[in-house]
Amino acid sequence: MANELTTPGYDIPREIEHQVTITRLDQIYNWSRKNSLWPMMFGLACCAIEMICTAASRFDFSRFGMEVMRPSPRQADVMIVSGTVTKKMIPQIVRLYNQMPEPKYVIAMGACASGGGPFKEGYNVVSGVDKFIPVDVYIPGCPPTPQALLNGLIALQKKIDTQSLSTVPWYRKGEIEPVPVPVLGPDLIDLRKSVQIKEYSAQRAAGLQDQPAVEGQQI
Amino acid sequence: MAEQTILQEPVDIAAHFPESVNQDTRSGFHGWVVRTGDLVQFATTLRDEFGYDYLSSVTGVDNYPQDQMEVIYHAYKTSGGPGVEFKVQVGREDPVVPSLVSLYPGAEFQEREIWDLFGIRFEGHPDLRRILMWEGFAGHPLRKDWKEPYFEEELKPFKSRWPDGHVVRAEEKNPFQDNLEYPPGFDPDEWTPQAEEALYKGLSQSRIPPDPELKTDTLIVNLGPQHPSTHGVFRMAVALDGETVVGLKPVMGYMHRNHEKIGERNTFLGNMPFTDRLDYITSMSNNFAYAITIEKLLNVKPPERTEYIRVIMAELTRINSHLVAIGFLLNDLGAFFTPALYGLAERELILDIFEATSGSRMMCNYFRFGGLARDLPDGVLQKIKDLVYERLPRKVEEFNTYLVNNEIVRTRCQGVGVLTREQAIAYSTAGPILRASGVAYDVRRAEPYSIYDRFDFDIPVRQNGDIFDRFLVRMDEIVQSIRIIQQAVQDIPEGPIMTGKSQYSVRVPAGESYGRVEGPKGELGFYVISTGKTNPWRYHVRAPSFINLTSLAPMSLGNKVADVVVILGSVDIVLGEVDR
């Protein structure tokens, strides 16, 4: 991209060469966005330590324009979900996601954030953050090495490069609906599924559901 | 080996209570079974007459299908020596046990955890709420008849995976295609989330009485769970009078990933990689504690070379953890990231050694029962020598020069967040916090394990019990760890690294075992019950970070809100271990 900017392939008068460039709006827009991604300073579990290592001197992701970690979601472009997402934490994560201004991206870092990981069977574990919020890049590993995280961030940059102002959702008409914040009930309640939950529970109460997924929980 | 650490105690304890205390006679079990009604009296005698002033661990066991639950206590003397184990047994239907919080305040969070996960109520507990799950959650998950939504089979390896290998995604068996389950007849529209009234009510109770002359309001501020200075997803509800903290309640469980429930389905060896993820900065120490616990049950002893490698790795872990702790403590003080970067730079060198030996930077999964996964590769010993003879001593000097006499560090840390000696013991704090309050208690000395009795090292102790002393104790411990490694790399013999054959599925004799090591954060213990099968019946982690947090409120009250952040930094918690 930098090369394209210095040699755009158009005739530019010699005296203003390297000072003026001709490019497409999409290209310059994406170029500036992808090289100044501000991650949210937000760590969940083990992966957060590797995220810190990626920010530290040896791996240093400021080389890619990402060193400005923002503790506030209002100032962040990318949420790196670094660790196990639990049912108790997911309402906060959804809320943080809703508070991020568009354009916003989500990276699921590590096995837990991508799909539950080694703790998937746990009763308090959400099987991947993508059950609630859209994810742009998944990074495998437990935890992913800093190199893997860098690779994921570069993959995100590549994704940004393919976007176009004319198709991105945040310049369309109308508001973007926030993700409904899940509620903590007897188990996690996803408000988008409340009809289904109600029906299923009523069926079970009436004894229609002969084979519940698990045996009744005794208190 | 098993004899040294078995928790048997002078018979005269039982003589005090001829009727209410009996020896646990089940094969492989030890300790005293105390009649529920006499528990408080027994514990009082134990503490005041026999000197067991330190209640290390409290945990529950569900003996389903027998109609019996147990609460198991491990108490020690801060002067050292083996501990005493006692337990009470209650029925499974609405069990009630008297609370020991008034005697040992350090039991507060542990009793709440047992209420949360087992449903055992503690009579007389000042604030019995759920701690890891939320109020309103259905059921008590560690009861053996409670099944999680993704429940497949009681024990691993699941038949669907091995030997047949017909894996179905867990989602496909669940009606919601997700990790969810609701009680019959549940209607989400009718549900009102149980607000955190109980939490805030408790907060107002713990207020320091306000100044009668000035009329002021107290303000409740929630720090976390998403807050850059809470070291993860930890939350503190703080009541403020102006800038002064007048009430504080830690709220946790945001990273509760059901370590113990999963651990009771896993095979014994299958738990080893899970222990890595407890305190994810110190995976080698966690491996160490778990390996010791199971080795006690198996009655095996690792070969000499293994013992040395274990000690080297555990001490490198301690340096690693303290570097992170010190770096982020300075971060909390406002020296934003520069000291942390210096700490992390050294940490990378230690991680290189871990990666070379175990294959992973953080999740080492390196220890096995009676041995290690593999020997040290070529050249690593030389790297360790370079580190402990050349690089680290110089770096410690550098840290000392820039930090210890730094005026800002001293003003912010000295006399802030004080925990007295008595408080430190009563609140069952462990590790650097306990030692910064003037208690020379270190499991490596108090009850030596592995080969720690062979090395020449000091237990750093400081007297003031403030943030600065905790910082200094960690600095001193880095120096002592370097000393231990220096001796170990000199003496390390050649030889095998495994006793017997390494095997996937270990059959562990029936019985119980409590193994503990001095981890970087304090006493890390594992309590395991085996029924003679390939999976543990009970698998409990005595997590130092979790129990150390009990003392956060007494340390913080009366300080300014900005100091609370630093006090939390000086406790040095890792959320993976707090919430498990």
Image: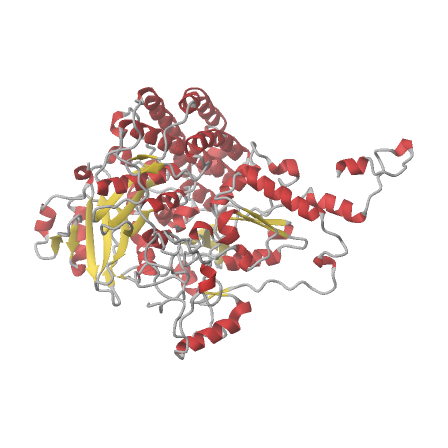
Q: Is residue B347 left or right of residue B63?
A: right
Residue at 77% over, 46% down: A27
Which colouring convention does the figure follow?
secondary structure
In the image, residue B334 lies at what x, y percent?
54, 39
Q: Is residue B192 left or right of residue A214?
A: right
Q: Is residue B100 left or right of residue B157?
A: left
Residue at 56% over, 37% down: A147
Asked whether residue B190 appears in the rendered view, the answer is: no
In the image, residue B87 lies at what x, y percent?
20, 54
User: Which of the 4 image quarters holds residue B198?
Assistant: bottom left
Q: Quadrant of the N terminus of chain B?
A: top left
Q: In this picture, is B359 found above or below A92? A: above
Residue at 69% over, 48% down: A160
In the image, residue B158 lies at what x, y percent?
36, 55
Which of the pair B316/B228 is nearer the observer?
A: B316
Residue at the front extreme of this rendering:
B164
Asked whether residue A166 appears in the rendered view, the answer is: yes
